[in-house]
Image: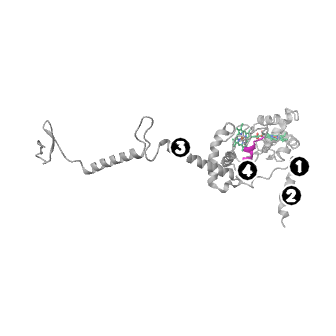
């Protein structure tokens, strides 16, 4: 090069341009910078070869590895689907009595049940499963029909008083004492007084004493001599603070005048076994779940109601006596 200029200050060659007396030195690029630059070029070439990169007319280049974001989504989905299938198969194969022995499966069931509950059950039982008038709260330990996993599964599978399901919980039909003229309005008021003494909402009175006699004659068969209810019949406990239809005088008089017969749909026609099992696990986990073997002994059969307290004792003692 003919007009190679050397800067007199630094002794470095200049690029040969000059702006108002300022010249640019022709220093080489720093080595680290250059190496990084080459590395980037190599990386970019590799990337273009391996991954989809260059748009063509109908579709882009596919890359050596055949990766695509759509493909990776599909793979993830397939993986999730496969693990869900395994979970469902495992649940279907595990009788609900044995679920508790597999805590991991139980946990998966509870979370699956929570999702299924949101879809199928909230419209009646409420989003927190707290229920409302006529729709039981599933969070408490007060069960019409029983609160261990097996009983809950049975209730969900076949429903309560569900027409057309021959294994549905039959649920006794309480007579409509007022509407059908079995009791007079005054007698119903007395019965209400007595029922409210059972849970301590009212003090004993002349009315409740008359009511006690009416109760013994008309109600014991289903609600039991002490008012504790009967799970075989779905007759509620009248001695606790939990009421399906309300605990005011009016509400109780209403229940006695025009009896209720709540219907819970059977889910066996709409949901598979695994989903029902998940729902049972979820409902059981809400707080009132009972353990197997802890279900209170079924209350007396209706016909033996008055003597049930005595009858129950020997019956319970029998197995012990039978031991050699
Ligand atoms: C159409 C309204 C309705 C829907 C939907 C419904 N239930 Fe119920 N459920 C009821 C009623 C009403 C009762 C109480 C029946 C009675 O009075 O005996 C009940 C009772 C129950 C019981 C028995 C509670 C006890 O104390 O023994 C369980 C468990 C239960 N439901 C779970 C579910 C689950 C789980 C779902 C969702 C798959 C569901 N229910 C959906 C109306 C419904
Ligand atoms: C044939 C059995 C039967 C007889 C007899 C009977 N009941 Fe009932 N009772 C039931 C059942 C079952 C229910 C629950 C209905 C439901 O779940 O919808 C119920 C519900 C009630 C309720 C509502 C409880 C709540 O939690 O809101 C009251 C109150 C009640 N009965 C009082 C009486 C009184 C008082 C008598 C007697 C005068 C009586 N019952 C006789 C079966 C019976």
How far apart in space, not on screen, are marks 4 and 3 (Cα)? Answer: 38 Å
How far apart in space, not on screen, are marks 2 and 4 (Cα)? Answer: 27 Å
Q: Which residue is mark 2?
A: 314
Tell which tag, 1 or 4, sits nearer the viewer. 4
Residue 93 visible in rendering = yes
Q: Which residue is mark 3?
A: 74
Numbered mark located on residue 304 in the image: 1
Q: How many numbered badges does the structure rendering display?
A: 4
Tell which tag, 4 or 3, sits nearer the viewer. 3
If the image is split into quadrants, where does the N terminus sit?
Answer: top left
Residue 144 coordinates in the image, percent (x, y): 76, 45
The segment highlighted magenta reads 150-160
Residue lying at 88% horizontally and 49% vertically, measured from the top left: 304
Residue 171 coordinates in the image, percent (x, y): 80, 42
Residue 154 coordinates in the image, percent (x, y): 74, 47
In the structure shown, which secondary structural element does the residue marked by tag 2 occupy? helix
Q: Which residue is mark 4?
A: 150
């Amino acid at each position: 090069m003919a007009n190679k200029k050397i800067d007199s200050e630094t002794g470095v060659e200049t690029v040969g341009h000059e702006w108002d007396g300022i010249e640019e030195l022709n220093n080489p690029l720093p080595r680290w910078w250059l190496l990084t630059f080459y590395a980037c070029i190599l990386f970019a070439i590799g990337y273009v070869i391996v991954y989809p990169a260059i748009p063509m007319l109908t579709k882009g280049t596919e890359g050596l590895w055949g990766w695509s974001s759509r493909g990776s989504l599909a793979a993830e989905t397939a993986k999730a689907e496969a693990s869900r299938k395994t979970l469902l198969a495992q649940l279907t194969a595990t009788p609900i009595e044995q679920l508790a022995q597999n805590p991991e499966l139980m946990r998966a069931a509870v979370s699956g049940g929570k999702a299924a509950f949101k879809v199928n059950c909230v419209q009646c039982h409420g989003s927190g499963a707290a229920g409302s008038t006529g729709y039981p709260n599933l969070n408490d330990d007060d069960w019409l029909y029983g609160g261990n996993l097996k009983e809950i599964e049975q209730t969900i599978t076949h429903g309560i008083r569900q027409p057309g399901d021959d294994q549905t919980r039959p649920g006794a039909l309480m007579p409509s004492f007022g509407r059908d003229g079995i009791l007079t309005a005054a007698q119903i008021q007395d019965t209400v007084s007595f029922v409210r003494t059972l849970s301590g909402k009212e003090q004993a009175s002349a009315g409740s004493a008359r009511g006690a006699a009416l109760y013994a004659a008309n109600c014991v068969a289903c609600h039991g001599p002490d008012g504790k209810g009967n799970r075989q019949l779905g007759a509620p406990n009248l001695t606790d603070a939990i009421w399906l239809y309300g605990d005011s005088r009016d509400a109780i008089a209403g229940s006695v005048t025009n009896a209720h017969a709540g219907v819970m749909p059977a889910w066996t026609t709409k949901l598979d076994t695994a989903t029902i099992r998940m729902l049972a696990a979820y409902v059981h986990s809400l707080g009132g779940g009972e353990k197997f073997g802890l279900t209170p002994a079924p209350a007396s059969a209706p016909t033996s109601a008055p003597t049930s307290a005595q009858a129950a004792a020997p019956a319970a003692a029998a197995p012990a006596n039978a031991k050699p």
